[in-house]
Amino acid sequence: MSFYDRYNKIKHHPYEEILAAMTVQDVDRALNQAEPDEYDLLALLSPAAAERLEDMAQKARKLTIQNFGKVISLYAPLYLTDYCVNKCAYCSFSFDNDFPRRKLTALEISQEAKALKDMGIQHVILLTGESRIHSSVAYLTESAHILRKYASSISIEVQPLDTEEYRQLFQAGVDGLTVYQEVYNEEIYKEIHIKGPKRNYRYRLDAPERGCQAGMRSVNIGALLGMDNWRKEVFFTALHAQYLQKRYLETDIAVSFPRIRPNLGGFEPRAVVEDKDLVQAMLAVRLFMPRAGITLSTREEAELRDHLIKLGVTKMSAASSTVVGGYAAKKEDNSQFEISDTRSVAEVKKRLKQLGYQPVFKDWDILADEEEWNDFSASRHHNGDTRAGAGV
Amino acid sequence: MDELIIGQKKLSSRLFTGTGKFADHSVMKQAFSASGSQVVTVAVRRVDLEAGHENILADIPENMTIMPNTSGARNAEEAVRIARLARAAGMGDWIKIEVISDQKYLLPDNEETIRATAILANEGFVVLPYMNPDLMAAKKLADAGAAAIMPLGSPIGSNRGIRMKEMIRILIEEKTLPVIVDAGIGKPSEAAEAMEMGADAVLVNTAIATADDPVRMAEAFSLAVAAGRKAYLAGLGPVSQRAAASSPLTGFLR
């Protein structure tokens, strides 16, 4: 069983028609359900729900505070390398975009991690382009080990890996996995992922499930909104999240709603996702899954982010740089996408407090076994392996 | 003096509180003082010893006993590691074991909880396990060396009141260990209900932390817990299932 089977079973439904046929009564019924089902979810995502946005917001806020409190966790991304073997229509890292690629050395990683720590950040997500050569599991493992000295929680957003590889990273102290499907519509997926291993839709779709199986504490999924009708994409995202939550009760499942941002290559979004659409998507998912985490990145503007916080967000990034070496060295080269909220950690923290939320920087202690790491490290060096990034 | 004794500590307040979900530390601090609570649970994973004045421990009044909890643990091993971290960080010997391998309902895993309790009690911790109210599990926890049991009233944060009433009543009646009703208490009246039933204490966090006015709500809970306890002592007590009927059928035999 895989979510792919489920997707194939339901992908042929006439969603445009079903969504268009939903009435305000359907939306009201969905709003009154203690546990909305899939049909209710479609009602909440339908154009008819626009009239009930405030009611949805009120309920979403109540559910979020009840389940998570008046608390927002803060994290920051750390870009390790921008080498990538894929050609994707919407991404600056595509291999045929001509810019000097970088890969951080062990020393540079500790400098970046220290810079983040000095800013107060303790939850770090390690990002790479997709390249098994430049962001190998061995490199990621060593990076995680360096990060452990500075961070209390480490997540990864890298090329999809096998279960065993995720398990190895988990043992090295990585406790969170983020994999965005980008677009659930398989046909569009094939169109925009032009070349490279990323064209394998199924391998990517199953990656979050492999992460759950490998023991990751939190798994974050999402669709890049703007690639297809957002209502359908959010519907599949939510079903995917629910599929994972039901099967892997021990894993925290979280959802993001990244909207496509300007990038090198000038890709135009295929579908417009306005602020009110983003809000509706987030609220619908909160009502459908009251316990799911909702992650908000600095892709969105500061003012919008301030409003979204009250509508169900549980985790957000702060002071992000999407450039390799963007913190310690203050590099300003080619970024994966443009940041919209450029506020510092201190500013975000202050604003959260003004809004009545407690910013949380530490929400975990890395429990991975140091001895396991030493065994691993010793065996690698014994085999004559090179240190992280040393060859670059 | 009606005191609750746990781990050699004498407690006059039977309201336990928690640090989770508060919008800010100063409100939290005021709420604690309004609650009169003497025991507060803190998630070890949220404690940041390097955070200086923003370290949550700095905002807990000195007269309160800190009961670190193993929130985030998914099995006995993780709970044990977190407990040791807490002790190493100077949070004392009390530990509330939370082993939750279910992120949807947040229900505890009794089996893993019993395992962790045995290990930690053996290491000298005062162990207070959060549990599904189950008599056999309670007995095993007592054997494992727990100092009290903390059965859930209903799932964490659900504010649904004491849905597990019958099972908790049995735990109280059997007196295996002190019973601290934890989780699910959404209103002061529900806290009073638990105390009237004969619970030794209640733990309330979400209902206080997420109230519009947490300080006032903390005081309301304090009053409700005291009232419920007083009613219990006054003789409300647990009603025996075999209570004498007012017109006994076999009375003629006497």
Image (tube, coloured by chain):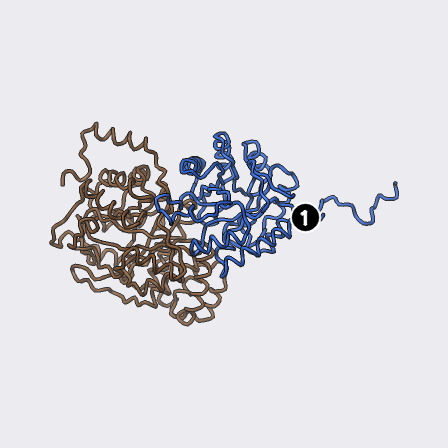
Chain colours: A brown, B blue
Q: Position of residue A171 (x, y in %)?
A: 32, 37
Q: Which residue is mark 1?
A: B232
Residue lying farthest to the front in this orientation: B62
**Chain to which mark 1 belongs:** B
Is residue A174 found left or right of B133 in the rendered image?
A: left
Is residue B131 found left or right of A371 in the rendered image?
A: right
Is residue A267 found left or right of B85 in the rendered image?
A: left
* Figure quadrant of residue B148: top right
SS at mark 1? helix
Q: Position of residue B45 (x, y in %)?
A: 40, 44
Q: Give the residue displayed 68% in from the left and 50% down from the top.
A: B231
Foreground pick, A219 / B46: B46
Q: Is residue A330 above or below residue A60?
A: above
Is residue A98 found left or right of B74 in the rendered image?
A: left
Q: Position of residue B5 (x, y in %)?
A: 59, 39
* Figure quadrant of residue A367: top left
State whether residue B161 appears in this view. Answer: yes
Q: Give the residue displayed 52% in from the left and 52% down from the top.
A: B33
Q: Is residue A195 above or below residue B95?
A: below
Foreground pick, A191 / A71: A71
Which amino acid, mark 1? Tyr
Q: Give the residue displayed 31% in from the left and 65% down from the top.
A: A303
Q: Position of residue B234 (x, y in %)?
A: 71, 48
Q: Is residue A316 above or below residue A164?
A: below
